[in-house]
Image (cartoon, grey):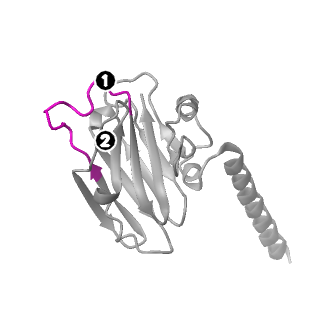
Amino acid sequence: MKSGRAIKSISFLFLIGLLMAGLLASGTGCSAKDLARGKTGLGEAEKRDAGTGSAGGSGSTPGTGSGTGGDPNGKAGKAGAGTREDSQGEVVVAVSWDGTGAGLTFQVALDTHSQSLGQYDLKELAVLKLDEGRELQPASWEPSGDDHHLSGMLTFPERGPGGEENLGSQVRGITLKIRDVSEVPERVFRWNW
């Protein structure tokens, strides 16, 4: 009889823990992934980024996704770095960028439990817009994974047609747009520095 009470007590505490985690997540705007990584809310840099629309995107409404990262000091190699996530429709798309020092290479992950992801060729569906107006088409998309969990490197050209650096000193922000994944017309991921 004591063991039955102990099991009920442990089960009750477990349920309370789950409830508290859910409340914490909903109250801070964190995703389940953020909580699993030990993040419980946005830091000061992320709050600043969110206010300028650089925290990622949710459809065609920039700045309403979840995001982490960002370097308000603009240090070489880290300026603009961070992960942005869009969970519209039946596919979650997360994009990580290591900042200006990493060039124009992005780690993209697509996750779903309802459809085949192999149909999405990001080389055809993505475009990168520089804040000064130019738009770049991907140079390559190298995916790996299975039909429900796909990730890969999405790379854009480092130099323009005239040999100029695409990520030169005049560029202070970039916007990655991914179209037509899981019937979502456009997903917007933004980084500013």
| Residue that mark 1 sits on | 170
Q: Horizontal placement of 23 versus 38: left or right?
A: right
Front-most of residues 87 and 41: 87
Residue visible at 43% across and 21% down in the picture: 73
Residue visible at 81% across and 66% down in the picture: 9
Would you call the spot at circle 2 few (<14 residues within 10 Å), some (14-19), or many (20 or more)? Answer: some
Magenta span: predominant SS is loop
Q: Horizontal placement of 88 versus 139: left or right?
A: right
**Foreground disc of the pair 1, 2:** 2
x then y, percent, for residue 4: 82, 76
- Mark 1 to mark 2 CA distance (whole Å): 15 Å
Q: Horizontal placement of 26 versus 113: left or right?
A: right
Amino acid on which disc 1 is placed: Gln
Image quarter of residue 43: top right
x then y, percent, for residue 113: 50, 72
Q: Is residue 92 above or below residue 98?
A: below
Image quarter of residue 15: bottom right
Per the image, is 163 magenta? Answer: yes
Front-most of residues 192 and 25: 192
Residue visible at 21% across and 43% down in the picture: 157
| Residue that mark 2 sits on | 135
What range is drawn magenta here?
Answer: 154-173
Specify the quadrant that holds the C terminus. Answer: top left
Q: Is residue 43 above or below residue 62?
A: above
Q: Is residue 167 above or below residue 126?
A: above
Front-most of residues 164 and 100: 164
